[in-house]
Protein backbone atom coordinates (compact mmCIF):
# COMPACT_ATOMS: atom_id res chain seq x y z
CA UNK A 1 0.00 0.00 0.00
CA UNK A 2 2.80 2.37 0.87
CA UNK A 3 4.45 1.61 -2.49
CA UNK A 4 1.23 2.52 -4.34
CA UNK A 5 0.97 5.85 -2.48
CA UNK A 6 4.58 6.73 -3.29
CA UNK A 7 4.03 5.77 -6.92
CA UNK A 8 0.93 7.97 -7.21
CA UNK A 9 2.73 10.93 -5.59
CA UNK A 10 5.65 10.53 -7.99
CA UNK A 11 3.27 10.33 -10.95
CA UNK A 12 1.52 13.50 -9.79
CA UNK A 13 4.85 15.33 -9.46
CA UNK A 14 5.85 14.22 -12.97
CA UNK A 15 2.50 15.41 -14.34
CA UNK A 16 3.03 18.85 -12.80
CA UNK A 17 6.57 19.04 -14.16
CA UNK A 18 5.31 17.98 -17.58
CA UNK A 19 2.60 20.63 -17.63
CA UNK A 20 5.04 23.36 -16.62
CA UNK A 21 7.43 22.11 -19.30
CA UNK A 22 4.62 22.24 -21.86
CA UNK A 23 3.77 25.78 -20.75
CA UNK A 24 7.40 26.85 -21.13
CA UNK A 25 7.54 25.25 -24.57
CA UNK A 26 4.38 27.09 -25.59
CA UNK A 27 5.83 30.44 -24.44
CA UNK A 28 9.02 29.80 -26.44
CA UNK A 29 6.95 28.83 -29.48
CA UNK A 30 4.87 32.02 -29.23
CA UNK A 31 8.05 34.11 -29.03
CA UNK A 32 9.52 32.38 -32.11
CA UNK A 33 6.33 32.92 -34.11
CA UNK A 34 6.21 36.59 -33.07
CA UNK A 35 9.83 37.03 -34.11
CA UNK A 36 9.25 35.38 -37.49
CA UNK A 37 6.08 37.28 -38.40
CA UNK A 38 6.50 40.64 -36.68
CA UNK A 39 10.01 41.55 -35.59
CA UNK A 40 12.07 40.12 -38.48
CA UNK A 41 10.04 41.73 -41.31
CA UNK A 42 10.11 45.06 -39.48
CA UNK A 43 13.91 44.84 -39.17
CA UNK A 44 14.22 44.11 -42.90
CA UNK A 45 12.01 47.05 -43.78
CA UNK A 46 14.00 49.34 -41.49
CA UNK A 47 17.26 48.27 -43.15
CA UNK A 48 15.79 48.98 -46.61
CA UNK A 49 14.65 52.46 -45.55
CA UNK A 50 18.07 53.22 -44.03
CA UNK A 51 19.81 52.05 -47.22
CA UNK A 52 17.47 54.26 -49.27
CA UNK A 53 18.24 57.29 -47.09
CA UNK A 54 21.99 56.72 -47.33
CA UNK A 55 21.75 56.49 -51.12
CA UNK A 56 19.91 59.78 -51.66
CA UNK A 57 21.52 62.07 -54.20
CA UNK A 58 20.85 65.35 -55.96
CA UNK A 59 17.88 65.13 -58.32
CA UNK A 60 16.00 62.36 -56.50
CA UNK A 61 12.27 62.97 -56.12
CA UNK A 62 11.11 62.11 -52.62
CA UNK A 63 8.19 62.33 -50.20
CA UNK A 64 8.57 63.28 -46.54
CA UNK A 65 6.65 61.87 -43.61
CA UNK A 66 4.55 65.04 -43.63
CA UNK A 67 3.52 64.47 -47.23
CA UNK A 68 5.75 67.09 -48.83
CA UNK A 69 6.86 66.21 -52.36
CA UNK A 70 10.18 67.60 -53.46
CA UNK A 71 13.40 67.17 -55.38
CA UNK A 72 16.69 66.77 -53.53
CA UNK A 73 18.92 69.77 -54.16
CA UNK A 74 21.67 69.17 -51.62
CA UNK A 75 22.59 66.28 -49.33
CA UNK A 76 24.43 66.71 -46.03
CA UNK A 77 25.18 64.26 -43.20
CA UNK A 78 21.79 64.29 -41.46
CA UNK A 79 19.83 66.80 -43.51
CA UNK A 80 18.58 67.41 -47.04
CA UNK A 81 17.56 70.50 -48.94
CA UNK A 82 14.42 69.88 -50.96
CA UNK A 83 13.10 72.10 -53.71
CA UNK A 84 9.33 71.98 -53.40
CA UNK A 85 8.58 74.68 -55.98
CA UNK A 86 10.58 76.99 -58.19
CA UNK A 87 13.10 78.77 -55.95
CA UNK A 88 11.43 77.38 -52.79
CA UNK A 89 13.81 75.19 -50.80
CA UNK A 90 13.35 73.66 -47.38
CA UNK A 91 15.75 71.93 -45.05
CA UNK A 92 14.52 68.55 -43.74
CA UNK A 93 16.00 65.77 -41.66
CA UNK A 94 16.98 62.63 -43.60
CA UNK A 95 14.86 60.57 -41.21
CA UNK A 96 11.75 62.37 -42.45
CA UNK A 97 12.17 61.10 -46.03
CA UNK A 98 10.16 57.93 -46.51
CA UNK A 99 10.12 57.03 -50.18
CA UNK A 100 11.30 57.79 -53.67
CA UNK A 101 8.70 59.24 -55.95
CA UNK A 102 10.05 58.75 -59.44
CA UNK A 103 8.44 60.01 -62.67
CA UNK A 104 6.85 56.62 -63.38
CA UNK A 105 4.88 56.77 -60.11
CA UNK A 106 3.77 60.40 -60.35
CA UNK A 107 0.34 61.28 -61.66
Image (cartoon, rainbow, N blue to C red):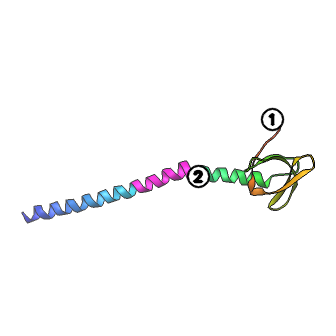
Q: Main secondary structure of the magenta part?
A: helix
Relative to 6, say whether 38 is above or below: above
Label 2 or label 1, whichever comes before in sequence order: 2
Q: Which quadrant holds the C terminus?
A: top right
Determine which of the numbered discs, if any, sits on residue 65 in the image: none
Disc 2 crowd rating (10 Å Cα; few below 14, some 14-19, many 20+) is few
> Front-most of 68 and 36?
68
Circles 2 and 1: CB atoms closer than 8 Å: no
Determine which of the numbered discs, if any, sits on residue 104 in the image: 1
Q: How many marks?
A: 2
- Residue 2 place in picture, x, y as percent: 8, 65
Q: What kind of element bears circle 2?
A: helix
Residue at figure coordinates x 82%, y 52% from the top left = 56
Determine which of the numbered discs, if any, sits on residue 40 in the image: 2
Disc 1 crowd rating (10 Å Cα; few below 14, some 14-19, many 20+) is few
Residue 29 is covered by the magenta coloring: yes
> Front-most of 2 and 37?
37
Residue at figure coordinates x 75%, y 47% from the top left = 67
> Front-most of 31 and 62?
62
Residue at figure coordinates x 44%, y 56% from the top left = 28
Q: Which quadrant holds the N terminus?
A: bottom left
Q: Is residue 5 found left or right of 79 in the rendered image?
A: left
- Residue 37 place in picture, x, y as percent: 54, 48
Q: What kind of element bears circle 1?
A: loop
- Residue 24 place in picture, x, y as percent: 38, 58
Comparing labels 2 and 1, the label whose residue is closer to the camera: 1
Q: Is residue 19 found left or right of 71 in the rendered image?
A: left
Residue 62 is covered by the magenta coloring: no
Residue numbers of the magenta segment: 26-40
Distance, label 2 to label 1, CA atoms, is 30 Å
- Residue 99 place in picture, x, y as percent: 75, 46
Amino acid sequence: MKFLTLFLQAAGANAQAGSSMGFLLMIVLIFVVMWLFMIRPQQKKQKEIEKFRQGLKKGDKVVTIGGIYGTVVEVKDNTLFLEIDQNVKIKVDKASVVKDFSDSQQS
